[in-house]
Image: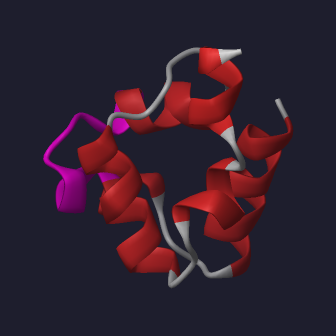
Amino acid sequence: MKQVTRLKTELFYRQISQRKVAKKAGVDPAFISRICNGANRPSKKVKEAICELTGLTELQLFGGEESKKAS
């Protein structure tokens, strides 16, 4: 849940709308909302779009999500 809070915080801090992220990633804005609320996990494509827009790395935004799944 920590990474979700970080994502919401970073989008807010950088004044990036979920709609803008959705357009960049080619997905519905509701999907971005569900990612921010923890209901869905972002695909690699969506993570890349978010990282590009925020200027942060995947690790900074989403932590070790992939390594957690492998454990």
Across and down, in percent, residue 62 comes to 65, 48
Residue located at (70% from left, 25% from top): 68
The vertical placement of 2 against 51, above or below, is: above
Quarter-of-image position of residue 5: top right
The vertical placement of 58 against 22, above or below, is: below
Residue located at (37% from left, 76% from top): 52
| Residue range highlighted in magenta | 22-30
Q: The C terminus appears in which quarter of the rendering?
A: top right
Quarter-of-image position of residue 49: bottom left
Across and down, in percent, residue 58 comes to 54, 60
- Relative horizontal placement of residue 42, taking residue 58 as reference (left or right): left
Across and down, in percent, residue 21 comes to 35, 59
As for residue 25 lying within the magenta part, the answer is yes
Total numbered labels: 0
As for residue 4 lying within the magenta part, the answer is no
Residue nearest the observer in this picture, 68 or 38: 68
